[in-house]
Amino acid sequence: MIDIISVSKAATLSKSKYPDTINASIGMFYDETGKIGGIPYVRNFLKNINADSILPYASMDGGQLFRNNVISWVLRDYEKDIRDTMFVDSFATLGGSGSISTTFSIYGNPGDAILVSDNRWQYERFAEVAKLNIFEHELFDGDAFNLKDFELKLDALTKKQKQVIVVLNDPCHNPTGYTLSISEFEKIVQILNKYTQNQIVFLYDIAYLEYDFNDSREKFKLIPELKPHVLTILAFSGSKTFGIYGFRMGASIAISKDELKIKDFYNYMIKTVRGYWSSSPAIGIELFNTVVDNPKPFLDDLNVILDVSKKRAKLFISEAKEAGLETLPFRNGFYIMVASKNPLKDYEKLLLHRIFVIPLRHGLRVALSSLSLDDIKGLPRKIKNILGDS
């Protein structure tokens, strides 16, 4: 398995020597001037922050204000309905990765398997630490989510183990940029509801929630339809949301009709986090609480980023079509995936031309988030010429 951060560091070094280097390796947003994060509000916050508010340890769970704020921020218009019909709690984590790792550790029984898509981000890194295996379903059926194989594989796994962790990365799927439709998500809820003889932990990885060109929060209106045997954990990434990648700010938001599941969630998190990292960085929590208190300036900056992201995706896709460069189904977000029969070989070919991407099983992940429009212009044709028909 390739180390994405190492590839990114190599690309940064290459860029310092060769300005024509294309660094499409890592999911961090750079604005059109090459500035990381691209959010003026966040930069101004960092310039003016009171050191006394961030130097002490934060509460292990993030504090009551943060816990309430993160639930409200994520659920928005659907918070009241979910709170009225279900039980909800949250806990601060080290980025979205912290939410994933604690979920695997708490709810995975060593030797069991988790259900993930065949085309995915590197969840196996966390599964390995928790001594869990990978059980795959096919992500796509043509240009749509493969609901048939998802149900088939979940059915097989529920026959082998009592408790099953189901991982879904949406919206702006990493690495393809695919986003589920409302109808697809509704069918997934219906499938999860069938397995009442099992305990289902539905890990919904929403790391790129704010970078969906359309608001995916509408899917949350379907969460109250989940039956009591399902525990939903929303893996929120503040690191991605606010472009503060090094701050490692995130949260797990637990939702269920079973009150005991939510009480157990909080108690499990206390024990696990105490042994993993003690408490999250106070600076990220302070930033988040400040934004929630007055969100408009941040949301205005975010809309600018979304507009730039749309333009980048539109340019890459249109030029890829013109060049005959095959890409996997894309809806929106940070990434797009170039199809490849031999990703590692093609990755090495591109490296010779100082183009840094990430080779995965079904193709090459291109991080549009880190490329300017000037970087993208002509890039699909260049990739096509280098790779040929491989």
Image (cartoon, rainbow, N blue to C red):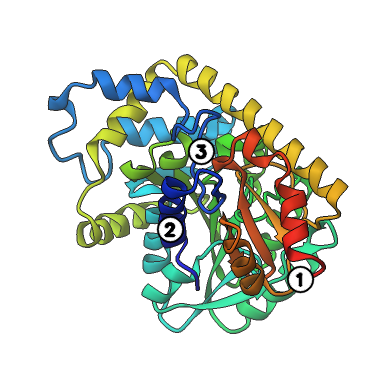
Tell me which numbered mark, 3 or 1, is placed earlier along the sequence.
3
**What secondary structure is marked by label 3?**
loop
Q: Quadrant of residue 341?
A: bottom right
Name the residue tied to disc 1: 149
208 left or right, relative to 184: left
Q: Residues within 10 Å of mark 3 (few under 14, many from 20)?
A: many
Query: Which kind of residue does numbered mark 3 sit on?
Result: Phe
Q: Alpha-carbon distance for marks 3 and 2?
A: 18 Å
43 left or right, relative to 275: right
Point 50% across, 73% down: residue? 1
Give how far across and how far down residue 81 sits, in percent: 58, 33
Tell me which numbered mark, 2 or 1, is placed earlier along the sequence.
2
Point 72% across, 64% down: residue? 139
Q: Residues within 10 Å of mark 2 (few under 14, many from 20)?
A: some
214 left or right, relative to 224: right
The label shown at residue 29 is: 3
